[in-house]
Amino acid sequence: MKKHRIVLIDDDRDILDMVTYNLLTEGYEVKAFFNAVDASKYVTAENTDLVITDWMLPEMDGLDLCRNLKHNTATQDIPVIMLSGRTEEIDIVTALEVGAEEYIVKPIRIREMLTRLKKILRRREGQQAAIAGVAGNESIVRGRLQLDLSTYTVRIAEELLDLTIVEFRLLELLARQPGKVFSRSQIIERINGADYFAAERSVDVQVAGLRKKLGAYKESIETVRSVGYRFNVKAL
């Protein structure tokens, strides 16, 4: 079995040691850094499966690191988890807008972080398997849209979409019950869990990103004013 390589960045030694220990215990290969400049050079040069970075860092912060990785074709597909003590809605939205896959508020709940990390890595492996032509058996089909639940991949009109794990879970939630309206708070709870902290506006950011990737079929995700979102099969 492949041993996933994770790059971890935090200028707090206690956090770095704690997270590194838990990742090693779970069987991951870990490369730890105190600053994003050195980490960025490493990620660009070496095979990396996932990056976990603190927001507040010397020289280059976590936002700039994420932004740089997403603007580089060699690293744009590497998922990024942002760690931060910042809990304002605008902070969470900003991190998601620059390309972070997950936003985890400190103090870190290590089991929750590991669960989210595993889902992200399974989704990435699923996308790679789909590209290689390996498909699973569990799927949701809605018109031209097909979600493969075993490989975390989505095809629309035979085109493979590159969705984040959150975008995938959002699309799965809506597509399972076409026509049903989900409020923003329901979406957050269904795809992240009842105790997950997230701003409701972050749902709008994820919907906007999902619609962009759906392209000509973006109208399949409908806005219900003052309520939330629903899935429209007729748009497919």
Image: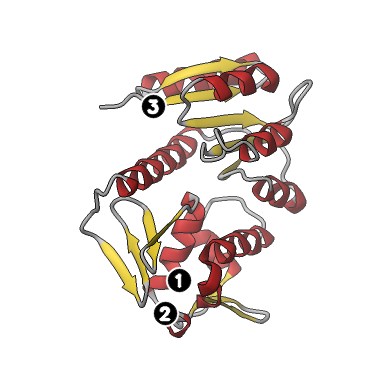
The amino acid sitting under disc 3 is His
For the residue labelled by badge 1, is the local secondary structure a helix, a strand or a loop? helix
| Placement of 140 over or under 197, stated as above or below | below
Res 193 seen here: no
Residue at x 34%, y 24% (from the top left corner): 3
The amino acid sitting under disc 1 is Leu
Neighbourhood count class around disc 1 (C-alpha, 10 Å): few under 14, some 14–19, many 20 upward: many
Q: Which mark is residue 7?
A: none
Per the image, the residue denoted by label 3 is: 4
Of residue 15 and residue 1, the one placed in the foreground of this image is 1
Per the image, the residue denoted by label 2 is: 178
In the drawing, does residue 177 fall left or right of residue 58?
A: left
Quadrant showing the N terminus: top left
For the residue labelled by badge 2, is the local secondary structure a helix, a strand or a loop? loop
Question: Picture coordinates of residue 188 (x, y %)?
Answer: 55, 60
Question: Picture coordinates of residue 48 (x, y %)?
Answer: 48, 26
Q: Which mark is residue 174?
A: 1
Question: Picture coordinates of residue 30 (x, y %)?
Answer: 47, 19
Is there CB contact under 8 Å for labels 2 and 1? yes
Neighbourhood count class around disc 2 (C-alpha, 10 Å): few under 14, some 14–19, many 20 upward: some
| Placement of 34 over or under 143, stated as above or below | above
Residue at x 55%, y 67% (from the top left corner): 215
Residue at x 37%, y 20% (from the top left corner): 25
Res 57 seen here: yes
Which of discs 3 and 1 lies nearer the camera? The answer is 3
Neighbourhood count class around disc 3 (C-alpha, 10 Å): few under 14, some 14–19, many 20 upward: some
Residue 28 falls in which quadrant of the image?
A: top left
For the residue labelled by badge 3, is the local secondary structure a helix, a strand or a loop? loop
The amino acid sitting under disc 2 is Pro
Task: Give the alpha-carbon distance from disc 3 to disc 1, as whole Å.
Answer: 31 Å
